[in-house]
Amino acid sequence: MSRFFIQGRLTVKKCRESLKFSYVHSYYSLSQEEDHILNYLQSSLSMCIEKLAQSLQKPAETISPPEVRKSTRIAIIALENVLAHICGEFIQTITAEFPVISVTSPDSENPSAEDKPISVSAPTPKNKKQKWNIRTKRNI
């Protein structure tokens, strides 16, 4: 099997799994406006997945590698949009519930002198290289 075919099949699998869990997130979404945006992104991802799956289900001699590669890239972009929306909504909810805490990744710029951050390393058990910094305001 060609590499593009295997990558396409893996993309379909990952996108379908992510879409499945995004429907659960959408069901418990707090904001109706955010829910409409997420539903749009989910339907866009669903259409991209189906187009990719249909191009992979053709007989082997009629599969077009450029078409599969293009459909794979489009499905990955649609998946990134859904995940970015969910992560953004999650961070907004966290900062709304706990206004004193701001969560930043280690890649972000250094905070200003006013913030005086308290850094707490919290590696996840699966990936010990990933750390998160939790900053609190000095005037608490």
Image (cartoon, helix red, strand yellow):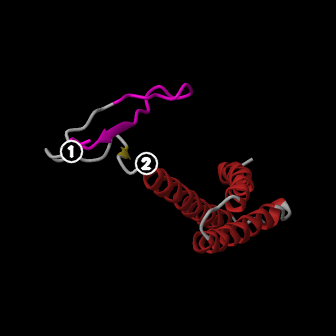
- In the image, the segment drawn in magenta is 120-140
Q: Is residue 132 magenta?
A: yes
Quadrant of the snapshot with the C terminus: top left
135 lies left or right of 81: left
Look at label 1 and name its amino acid.
Asp
Disc 1 designates what residue? Answer: 115
Which residue is situated farthest in the front direction here?
140
Number of residues whose C-alpha sits closer than 10 Å to that of mark 2, classed few (under 14), some (14–19) or many (20 or more):
few
What kind of residue is marked 2? Phe
Residue 90 position, x and y percent, is 53, 54
Q: Residue at x 66, y 50 (%)?
A: 7
Q: Position of residue 109 (x, y in %)?
A: 24, 47
The vertical placement of 93 against 63, above or below, is above
Q: At which x and y percent is residue 56?
A: 78, 61
In the displayed structure, does residue 111 sit left or right of residue 133?
left
Verify whether residue 95 appears in magenta.
no
Say which of 136 and 120 sits in front. 136
